[in-house]
Image (tube, grey):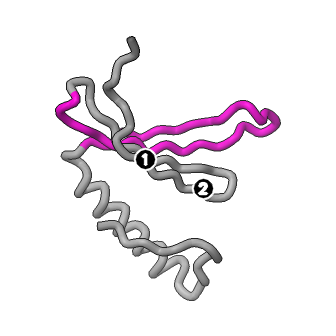
Amino acid sequence: MEPTYKDEIFTKRVRAGKRTYFFDVKSTKSEKDFYITITESKRVVGDEEKYEKHKIFLYKEDFDKFSEALQETVTHVRGHLLAGVPVEAGVTEERVA
């Protein structure tokens, strides 16, 4: 019988050009807690079957710090580096809570 822990509780896929990002909420082995994985996936050049993946594990005690740092970074880039540059067509802006 296959273990049921780490089952995805929630998943959100974001396609972004040649990359796809996955935001997954998974349960711990004890099923009493949860965490988030953020995965970047892109095809390996020259091989339609292989994907290169990079994964970050984010635990609940770090959610606020991570969210604040991400929002601050995005705000800085938009305000200082992309000032006056139009947002890509089809891309919606969302605020990180």
Badge 2 element: strand
When asked about the image quadrant of residue 15, the answer is bottom right
Q: Residue 80: x, y in percent?
A: 47, 80
Q: Is residue 35 magenta?
A: yes
Q: Residue 58: x, y in percent?
A: 32, 43
Give the label on residue 11, or none.
Answer: 1
Seen in the picture, residue 70 relative to 94 is either above or below; the reply is: above
Q: Residue at x 60, y 83 (%)?
A: 85
Label 1 neighbour load within 10 Å: few <14, some 14-19, many 20+ = few
Quadrant including the C terminus: bottom left
Q: Looking at this view, is 27 or 47 the one in front?
A: 27
Seen in the picture, residue 87 relative to 49 is either above or below; the reply is: below
Q: Looking at this view, is 67 or 2 the one in front?
A: 2
- Marks 1 & 2, CB-CB < 8 Å contact: no
Q: Residue at x 34, y 41 (%)?
A: 9
Q: Amino acid at mark 1?
A: Thr
Give the label on residue 15, or none.
Answer: 2
Q: Residue furthest bottom?
A: 84
Quadrant including the N terminus: top left
Q: Is residue 53 magenta?
A: yes
Task: Indicate left or right for 44 with 76 as reference.
Answer: right
Which region shows up in magenta?
A: 31-59
Label 2 neighbour load within 10 Å: few <14, some 14-19, many 20+ = few
Q: Residue furthest top?
A: 1
